[in-house]
Image (spheres, grey):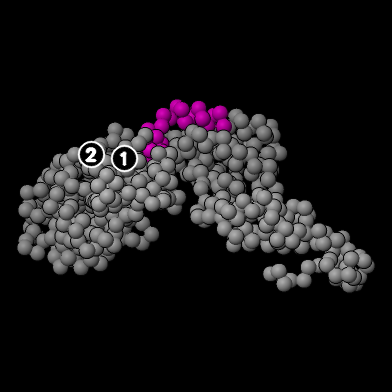
Amino acid sequence: MDQRPVPGRTAEDATGSTAAPGDPARRPDITDARRRIPRTDALLRDPRLSAAVDRLGPQRVKAAVHQAQERARTGGIPPEQVPQTALSLLPGTAGGLRPVINATGVLLHTNLGRAPLSAAARQAVREAAGPTDVELDLTTGVRARRGRSALAALHERVPAAGAVHVVNNGAAALVLAATALAAGKEIVVSRGEMVEIGDGFRLPDLLVSTGARLREVGTTNRTTAADYAAVIGPDTGFVLKVHPSNFRITGFTRSAEPADLAGLGVPVVVDIGSGLLAPHPALPGEPDADSQLRAGAALVTASGDKLLGGPQCGLLLGRKDLVHALARHPLARALRVDKLTLAALEATLTGPSTPTALALTADPDRLAARAGRLAATLAAYGIDVRAVESAATVGGGGAPGTTLTSAALSLPEPYAAALRTGRVPVVGRLEAGRCLLDLRAVPEEDDVRLAEAVRSVAQGPAGPSAPAGTEG
Ligand SMILES: *Cc1c(COP(=O)(O)O)cnc(C)c1O
């Protein structure tokens, strides 16, 4: 890159008189500008860029510097703007994942990483990032159970469980249960609960991959306890109940509950999906771990980053002998969670309300008031914006069919793409030819950033500036 001949560095160019005829790139004005492009080493001495090197590493910063120099060479920016442009091309963090504002109205958006962590959980993750006592008792100096305080916090929240264990995600929890309890045996499951969780992942395929066999019973819409009882035998590993967490069957339906199946003489494993630990008043149809265990489930599996509002992980809660068998199985080592997850999980369980819980219980009147305020602020800049009522959903495998009254900003459709690609990316949704920014999943403290993002789109050259001009 630095071998590239730098225009304007030759003696000829210095005279300013030798632009080749017919070569527009060498017109004196451009050549003169090129001469003023700062060199890479000089740019890296700029305190703002050297601070960026400390934060992001030299590779990223050099790449941004080269990109900015190239823009100046081709006349896209004046040479004086090279440092500023290089800075603007840098990512906010070395991690690569960009923080976004979730204005989709889907509380747990899979493509946006499901549950956002609480401030307490984020702080816990930062503190656990260095050397930490995850497997050491600092008092005695001897090895201790990995993640014992996070597990204790989980157990405390689900008193009906005899023991608890945590793995990498909900799918891993199921795989561990199937491997440890049913490899070479049968898992009895209703035909109405053969679920695809998303992106082509099907639970039946996952279960069969462990070496267990599926024994399907009942029909898509109706399965009774007698259907299960008829096939239970020495080959049965366990009965599996799967919560249809992303679809709903209504009409002529029937299904058996753990209470109906607990007496069959085999463990009843319930995959509740969403991770509610206790009943939630806003979601009466959503199963929770404690109630399922009290009703006779031997084991409950769930995700940590759905309605629990924590980090991605898989929860295993239930009978002591079963949970211990799972935790001691060789596969458990391959599915174990890291210290960051354990820290975030404990802070989620013991700390203040999670962003997910707050979004779930947000008062619709208050959401409408926020939307009204934001719309008034933005309309004052001539932006075509209205506050509208909206319907939010839980998403991410929870409470299918439930809508939550919400409020949104309604903007012209071109705002959607412009907001998504802005400096602070905002992801909204399209509805009836308008871009809606739903506030239910947006923490109130982000309202100012949200308004700024909309304003910068309205003013920006690439943004749909037309709406800003159509006042009145
Ligand atoms: C989400 C979900 C899973 C998968 O959990 P992950 O944490 O995404 O691996 C399994 N079962 C049900 C019912 C779910 O809703």
Q: Amino acid at mark 2?
A: Glu
Task: Examine the image and state in which quarter residue 158 appears.
Answer: top left
Q: Residue at x 33, y 61 (%)?
A: 201
Name the residue nearer the viewer: 471 or 340: 340
Q: Which mark is residue 109?
A: none
Q: Residue at x 65, y 30 (%)?
A: 380
Q: Does 362 lie within the magenta span? A: yes
| Label 1 vs 2, first from the N-terminus | 2
Report the predominant secondary structure element of the magenta stretch.
helix
Task: Examine the image and state in which quarter residue 266 appears.
Answer: bottom left
SS for dot 2: helix
Q: Which residues are magenta?
A: 353-374
Q: Is residue 318 above or below residue 236?
A: above
Is residue 352 found left or right of 207 in the rendered image?
right
Rate crowding at label 2 as few (under 14), some (14 to 19) or many (20 or more) other CA atoms within 10 Å: some
Q: Residue at x 12, y 52 (%)?
A: 321
Image quarter where the C terminus lies is top right
Q: Are marks 1 and 2 in contact (CB under 8 Å)?
A: yes
Q: Amino acid at mark 1?
A: Leu
Residue assigned mark 1: 349
Residue assigned mark 2: 156
